[in-house]
């Protein structure tokens, strides 16, 4: 029986059985210096359960609940539940949202600047009295009651910012001022997991319960948050800025010399680096190319001033990023390393944090409690090894078939193909394409085909015949465009990349119908081995054995991506989906096979395309929901 105190904070009339189980487990395990791991399928109601348990636990105590978000869309979930709690039960929880200052700015042109340039512009506007939102806040403060009345019932970050802008005050600074008055804080990862954040928030972790949804991404989100790039394109753009906007002859000449030296870095150090990936490089070799760097600082100030005087919107400059990168290399701690990288955006020098625990362990170990949850959590021992968690952790894992009927899922390993690097060939790509076409022809709605990389996607696409209505994930693809296209014609073959925008954080659903009939996972989406990934294995190995370290970095990244892809077809307990694991390695790798058979009911194996299509048609013929 769920605690009545917890039920008070449920934003619905009643509990779903699994949701009540999650809330009860969290509430009973929230204690000082404790962690809670929750794995449960999408649709169970994890967000509402975690919020209800945490708010109930903190009631009457000097404990704040901090809901951590990585993306703008992730803020929608807690805001939606708070809005429902107000509407259904008339209970308002005082809360604030704190994202980076640019995303909360009322001046739209300024908010689109690169973040470092935005902060410079923001400080300039405040210093000169040109930001009326800051001036009003400084002179009049913010009325607590009016602020909370304004944000009550809002359901998106965009509404939140617009509503506070209408009060005439800066949403970012006003929200930070009211942190002490809030019971719940919706907070960007940046403020707790960035080692060099220009701005911080005043929080007492010992008196905070952290809720982190989609936590399967947390170790790599922490690493990304502490990564800096110097790209060749950035240097070329800086040259254009100097030539166009710097009038001082000496400064211009010195800055161009400095940039020419940095451009030579890309010419010299990348000799022999041709494949996509990352190769480690000593920082001393990189610093040799940073000459006359002081001229870049002078040029940066002149460029920004010149652009501002000419009324140019988005008046940033890549010079600022180059200077920041140089400073980070000069002061680079032992936990970071430099890599030569060639990716889809060209050549780059990348400064990476090598150990996510450096940024995460202090936060998680010092919090009063934390709740990490996802539909695809890796094993707790591997997750805690990556993040350096030392406190006691309790876990609750709800399997897919506890939520979805076994009859709603059919999974088949199609062993006729593989994307294993040593076996890739045009014949393999042709076979994959033919199998996808046969699957597409056998369903009424859409097939989501998930590739391990964009290269394998492109190699397969050329074999897909005309007449197939394709949606292909590329850099400019937007979720809105994809969903709009499906509305026009729901019979699509969607080519996506594992871990990409069409596999995480999207629902192909309209009017309670999920338009994904089949999910085909082409190949096991292992990360590409490179110096960075292997270095990460070495870091984790210092806290675990080699096998666990390798699986934490490689195997479980692949499995999480596979489960995320499967989840696109199962967004509620009413959905039905046919899963095709298109690679013999799903059966031949013991760890992957064990995990898949535990996760999916009754997996069959076939190397016959005809048999695959027969099983698909048999499954869809029993589908009464679509």
Image: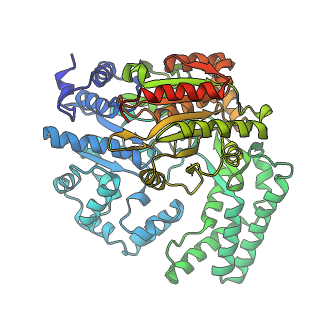
Q: Kindly give the residue lying farthest to the left in the view shown.
A: 90
**Residue 309 visible in this rendered orientation of the protein:** yes
Task: Tell me what residue is drawn at x 74 percent, y 31 percent.
Answer: 420
Q: How many marks?
A: 0
Task: Tell me what residue is drawn at x 55 percent, y 45 percent.
Answer: 494
Q: Is residue 356 left or right of residue 15?
A: right
Q: Position of residue 327 (x, y in %)?
A: 65, 55
Image quarter hosting the N terminus = top left
- Judging depth in this view, the residue of 326 and 449 nearest the camera is 449
Q: Is residue 438 left or right of residue 115?
A: right
424 vs 191: above or below? above
Q: Is residue 62 left or right of residue 47?
A: left
Q: Position of residue 53 (x, y in %)?
A: 27, 27
**Residue 332 visible in this rendered orientation of the protein:** no
The answer to which quarter of the image holds residue 133 is: bottom left
38 vs 288: above or below? above
Task: Tell me what residue is drawn at x 57 percent, y 24 percent.
Answer: 412
- Judging depth in this view, the residue of 157 and 125 nearest the camera is 157
């Amino acid at each position: 029986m769920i605690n009545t105190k917890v039920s008070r904070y449920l934003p619905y009339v009643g509990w779903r059985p699994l949701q009540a189980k999650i809330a009860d487990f969290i509430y009973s395990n929230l204690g000082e210096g404790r962690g809670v791991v929750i794995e449960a399928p999408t649709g169970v109601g994890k967000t509402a359960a975690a919020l209800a348990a945490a708010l109930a636990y903190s009631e009457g105590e000097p404990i704040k609940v901090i809901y951590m978000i990585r993306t703008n869309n992730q803020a929608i979930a807690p805001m939606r539940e708070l809005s429902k709690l107000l509407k259904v039960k008339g209970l308002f929880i005082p809360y604030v949202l704190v994202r980076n200052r640019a995303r909360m700015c009322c001046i739209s042109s300024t908010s689109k600047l690169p973040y470092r340039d935005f902060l410079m512009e923001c400080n300039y506007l405040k210093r000169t009295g040109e930001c009326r939102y800051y001036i009003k806040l400084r002179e009049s403060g913010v009325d607590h009651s009016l602020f909370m009345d304004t944000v009550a019932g809002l359901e998106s970050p965009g509404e939140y910012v617009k509503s506070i802008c209408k009060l005439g005050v800066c949403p970012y600074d006003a929200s930070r001022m009211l942190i002490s008055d809030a019971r719940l804080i919706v907070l960007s990862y940046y403020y707790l997991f960035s080692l060099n954040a220009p701005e911080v928030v005043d929080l007492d972790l010992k008196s905070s319960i952290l809720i982190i949804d989609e936590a399967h991404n947390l170790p790599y989100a922490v690493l990304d948050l502490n990564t800096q790039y110097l790209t060749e394109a950035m240097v070329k753009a800086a040259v254009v800025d100097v030539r166009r906007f710097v009038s001082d002859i000496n400064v211009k000449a010195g800055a161009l010399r400095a940039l020419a030296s940095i451009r030579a870095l890309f010419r010299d150090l990348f000799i022999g680096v041709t494949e996509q990936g990352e190769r480690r490089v000593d920082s001393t070799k990189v610093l040799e190319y940073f000459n006359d760097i002081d001229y870049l600082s002078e040029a940066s100030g002149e460029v920004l001033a010149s652009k501002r005087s000419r009324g140019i919107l988005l008046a940033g400059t890549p010079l600022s990023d180059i200077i920041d990168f140089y400073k980070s290399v000069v002061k680079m701690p032992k936990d970071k390393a430099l890599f030569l990288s060639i990716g889809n955006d060209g050549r780059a020098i990348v400064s990476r944090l090598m150990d996510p625990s450096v940024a995460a362990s202090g936060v998680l170990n010092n919090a009063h409690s934390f709740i990490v949850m996802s539909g695809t959590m890796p094993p707790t021992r591997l997750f805690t090894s990556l993040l350096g968690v030392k406190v006691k952790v309790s876990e609750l894992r709800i399997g897919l078939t506890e939520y979805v009927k076994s009859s709603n899922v059919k999974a088949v390993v199609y062993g006729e193909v593989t994307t294993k690097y040593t076996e890739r060939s045009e014949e393999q790509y042709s076979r994959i394409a033919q199998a996808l076409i046969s699957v597409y022809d056998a369903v009424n709605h859409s097939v989501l085909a998930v590739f391990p990389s964009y290269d394998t996607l492109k190699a397969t696409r050329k074999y897909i015949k005309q007449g197939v209505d394709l949606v292909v994930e590329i850099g400019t693809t937007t979720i809105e465009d994809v969903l709009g296209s499906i509305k026009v014609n729901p019979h699509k073959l969607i080519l996506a990349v594992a871990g990409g925008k069409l596999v995480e954080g999207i629902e192909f659903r309209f009017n309670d119908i999920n338009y994904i009939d089949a999910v085909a996972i082409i190949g096991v989406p292992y990360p590409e081995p490179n110096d960075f990934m292997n270095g990460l294995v070495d870091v984790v190995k210092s806290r675990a054995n080699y096998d666990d370290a390798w699986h934490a970095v490689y195997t479980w990244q692949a499995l999480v991506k596979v489960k995320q892809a499967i989840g696109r077809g199962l967004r509620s307990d009413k959905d039905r989906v046919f899963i095709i694991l298109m690679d013999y390695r799903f059966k031949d790798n013991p760890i992957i096979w064990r995990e898949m058979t535990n996760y999916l009911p009754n997996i069959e194996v076939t190397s016959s395309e005809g048999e695959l299509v027969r099983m698909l048609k048999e499954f869809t013929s029993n589908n009464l929901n679509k």
